[in-house]
Amino acid sequence: MQPKVKKNLLTTSAHIGLLIASAFFLVPFLWMVSTSLKPVTQIFTYPPEFIPNPFQWSNYIEATEYIPFFTYLSNTAIITVLSTIGVMLSCPLVAYSFAKLEWTGRNTMFIITIAVMMIPMQVTMIPLFLLFNKVGWVGTPLPLIVPAFFGVPFSIFLMRQFFMGLPNTLRDAAKIDGASEFRIYWQIMLPLAKPAVLAVGLFQFMNVWTDFIGPLLYLTDESQYTLSLGLQQFQSQKGTEWGLMMAVSTMMTLPIIILFFFMQRTFIQGITFSGIK
C-alpha cells in the first residue's frame, strides 16, 4: 500500500471513529431536548418518537413556575462570573511567578501546588467547611467565590506551561527599556497569554456552573440556591414529570454549550499552546 493511500485511509478511519464517539455524547443531549418538548403521553411511547408531535413549549413555562428558576439562574450567574474573574486574575499572576521569576523556594512551592491538585475533594471537604463555618461564611456564597481569587492548582499549572513557552528575550528587552516586572507581566506577557487565560476561564465557568457539592455544603437559604440545587429540588418534587425535568435540565445546560460553541477555537488554542496533551 502506498504511503499516501495509507495516510488517507488512517485519516478517514480517525474521522469516522470521532464521528461515532461524538454521537455517544450528542444523542443523550438531543434526547433531553426532545423529551423537554414532548407531552407526557408521548415520552414513553413505543416505538419511541424522537421528534415531538406536537411541540409542547409550555413545559418550559411550567418548569419555571414550580421553582424560582430565574432567582436560581441569577445566583448561579453571579457566583460563576465572580469566581471566573477571580481565576482569570489570580492564576496567570501566580503562574508567571512560577515560570519567569527567580525566588527562593519557587520549585518547592510549585511541587506543593501540583500535590494539592492531586488531593481528592472529599479529603478537604470537611476541613474547609469547618474553616468557613468558623469565619462565618457558611450560609453565604463567599466560600464559592473567594477561593478562586487565590488561584486554582490546575489553572496555575496550565498557565505556567504557557508562560514557559514564551521567549525570555521579550522580558529581557523590556527590562533594558526600564520596564518594571509588573509592567512586563501586565503589558507584554499577559496579552500574549490571552488564549490560555480564556481557556482557564472557560474551565472555571463550566466547573462552577455545574457544581453541586459546593452549593450543597455552604448554601443554607433557598433564596441563595444555584441551578444545580434547584434541579435536585425539582427532581425531589416533580421527578416523575420527565418533560418538565428535562426542560429544567436543558435550560441549565444550554448556556455552557453556547459559550463553548463560540469559544471553542480560543479554548483549543489555549490548551495546545500550553503543551497539555
Image (cartoon, rainbow, N blue to C red):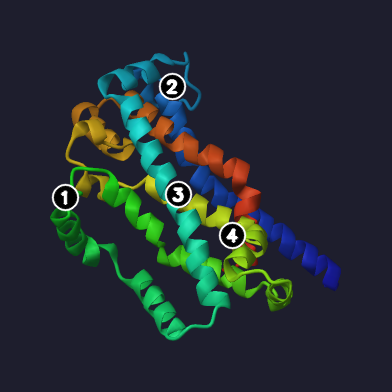
Residue bearing mark 2:
37
In the image, 18 versus 155, the foreground residue is 155
Residue drawn 61% across the image and 46% down it: 263
First along the sequence among labels 1 and 4: 1
| Image coords of residue 213 (percent x, y) | 26, 50
Q: Which three-letter amino acid code belongs to the residue tagged 3? A: Thr
- Distance, label 1 to label 2, CA atoms, is 44 Å
| Image coords of residue 133 (percent x, y) | 15, 53
139 horizontally vs 189: left or right: left
Up the image or down, 216 lies above or below 3; here it is above
Tag 3, which secondary structure? Answer: helix
Residue bearing mark 4:
196
Q: Which label is found at residue 136?
A: 1
Mark 1 vs mark 4: give the one in front: 1
Tag 4, which secondary structure? Answer: helix
Mark 3 vs mark 1: give the one in front: 1
Q: Which three-letter amino acid code belongs to the residue tagged 1? A: Gly
Q: Which label is found at residue 84?
A: 3
- Distance, label 1 to label 4, CA atoms, is 35 Å
Tag 1, which secondary structure? Answer: loop
